[in-house]
Image (cartoon, helix red, strand yellow):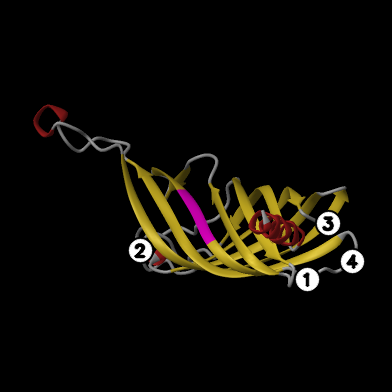
């Protein structure tokens, strides 16, 4: 009996000392384009498109916590006007979330993750009769470092809007694109549990 009472007290204290944010987002990518014409087919910039996404954030009473998020390109893009592809970004972060006012707080995050690129095979280069199957896509994966931030504004009860910016340094991304530096700008709509 005493143990269960202690567990209930600890859980009640723990519930008041935490905050969970659930959000959906929309954003677009920005990256530098090639400025040299020394190559016949220079790698394109990884930019543009609509990127829906989602995130979950867990913040403790001391305003530090963790964040996990992903975003993917809604429609296929064309690589150098020829091959369809679709990128997906995912990352986990440490978060600092200071309170600015009663209705506003900031989110600063840094972490790591990955980029998954799916290139769709437009023309089959194999004979399914002899090989058994024909791949319709080729994937490439890259490690990335992430820095991000946003300002959360509570517009109604525990619902918030958050304009945000995310910078990715994608290791090895210059194998497919002009630059490994990518900026994702957008906004999230979310709900806070335990505010």
Q: Are marks 3 and 2 in contact (CB under 8 Å)?
A: no
What residue is shown with label 3? 153
Label 3 sits on a secondary structure element that is strand
Mark 2 or mark 1, earlier in chain: 1
Q: Is residue 122 above or below residue 70?
A: above
Between marks 1 and 4, how big is the CA–CA gap? 9 Å
What residue is shown with label 1? 98
Highlighted range, magenta: 87-91
Residue shown at the point (89%, 66%) measured from the top left: 101
Q: Are marks 2 and 1 in contact (CB under 8 Å)?
A: no
Q: Which of 84 and 102 lies nearest the eye of the viewer?
A: 102
Neighbour tally class for label 2: few under 14, some 14-19, many 20 plus, Cα within 10 Å: few
What residue is shown with label 2? 175
Asked if the stretch drawn in magenta spans residue 82, the answer is no
- Quadrant of the snapshot with the C terminus: bottom right
Between marks 2 and 4, how big is the CA–CA gap? 45 Å
Nearer mark to the viewer, of 2 and 1: 1
Nearer mark to the viewer, of 4 and 3: 4
Neighbour tally class for label 4: few under 14, some 14-19, many 20 plus, Cα within 10 Å: few
């Amino acid at each position: 009996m005493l143990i269960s009472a202690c567990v209930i007290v600890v859980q009640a204290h723990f519930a008041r000392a935490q905050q969970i944010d659930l959000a959906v987002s929309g954003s677009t990518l920005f990256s530098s384009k090639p400025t040299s014409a020394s190559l016949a087919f220079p790698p394109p910039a990884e930019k543009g498109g609509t990127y829906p996404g989602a995130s979950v954030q867990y913040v403790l009473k001391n305003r530090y916590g963790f964040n996990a998020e992903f975003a993917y390109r809604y429609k296929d893009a064309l690589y150098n006007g020829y091959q369809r592809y679709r990128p997906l970004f995912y990352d986990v972060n440490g978060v600092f979330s200071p309170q600015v006012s009663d209705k506003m707080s900031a989110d600063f995050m840094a972490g790591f993750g990955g980029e998954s690129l799916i290139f769709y095979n437009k023309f089959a280069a194999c004979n399914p009769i002899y090989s058994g199957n024909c791949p319709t896509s080729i994937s490439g994966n890259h490690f990335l470092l992430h820095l991000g931030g946003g300002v959360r504004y509570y517009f109604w009860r525990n619902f918030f809007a958050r304009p945000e910016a995310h910078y990715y340094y994608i290791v090895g991304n210059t194998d497919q694109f002009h630059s490994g530096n990518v900026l994702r700008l957008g906004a999230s709509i979310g709900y806070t549990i335990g505010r």
